[in-house]
Image (spheres, rainbow, N blue to C red):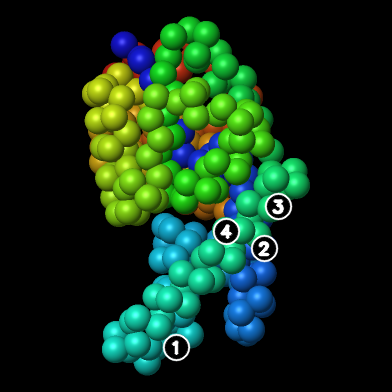
Amino acid sequence: MLKALIFDVDGTLADTESVHLAAFNHAFAQEGLDWRWDTAQYTRLLEISGGKERMLHFWRTVQPGLREVDAGAVQATVQRLHEIKTAHYEGAVNAGAVALRPGVLALMNEARVQGLGLAIATTTSPVNIAALLRSAIGADWRADFLAVGDASSAPVKKPHPQVYLQVLADMGLPAAQCIAFEDSANGLQAATAAGLRTVITPNGFTAHHDFTGALRVVPDLSQVSVARLREWHALPART
């Protein structure tokens, strides 16, 4: 029996990646770096989960001689860049630069009415989640969710299943009674490794990913109802 829906955030609840990209480039410029990511490069970098991890990976590609002896200074720089980037992103979201994807809010509302629990499982920061959902749902958005897993509570990034395992434990539900919603291959791998059947809603940054093993791949959630999810959930698992 289906009892809960678990949502990723970036790219799944909202098309946030273009705003994140602009925020990264703002941080680089603010700190006087000559880095500037274009859409194609950022699409490739999204294969690395986590903003700090993404920047560190990029730094090591442009400066292969980056040595661990400099790790303290490197980590401090990455942390500072991430703080600037996060503040810029939050400001953009608060100014209305991001909206929930089609069908997301309607499905959440229908799920609550029908007694299903809702949860968040993401590798993004708590600030980013709060900015988006405060804008989309309201100041009391947290009350709508049984559990929220994020980069602060589950530091091992997707495709590792840590955040999903944490959320399932916090809800006290087995994976077999839940459906996850993701937009990327890393997210699908994380959810699947936690035993979750997963609905994928790709976006422009992830449409080329391999979604083998997904419960369903749909353009968005505008045509997805709780009744349809129950039907999909009741079908035998694909092998």
Mark 2 or 3, nearer chain start: 2
Q: Secondary structure at mark 2?
A: helix
Q: Nearer the viewer, residue 141 or 101?
A: 141
Q: Which circle's residue, 4 or 1, is located before the other in the chain?
A: 1
Q: In 3D space, how far apart are the residues under numbered discs 3 and 1 (Cα atoms)?
A: 31 Å
What amino acid type is highlighted by mark number 4?
A: Thr
The disc placed on residue 63 is 1
User: Which amino acid type corresponds to the residue marked 2 in the rendered image?
Assistant: Ala
Residue 181: horizontal and vertical position, in percent? 45, 33
Label for residue 86? 4
The mark nearer the N terminus, 3 or 1, is 1
Q: Is residue 114 above or below residue 237?
A: above
Image quadrant assignment for residue 40: bottom right
81, 51: nearer the viewer: 81
Residue 22: give its label. Answer: 2
Q: Residue flagged by tag 3: what amino acid is it?
A: Ala
Discs 4, 2 touching: Cβ within 8 Å: no
Residue under the image location 35 percent in, 81 percent down: 72
**Mark 2 vs mark 3, CA separation in Å:** 10 Å
Is residue 18 visible in the rendered image? The answer is no
Q: Is residue 81 above or below residue 203?
A: below
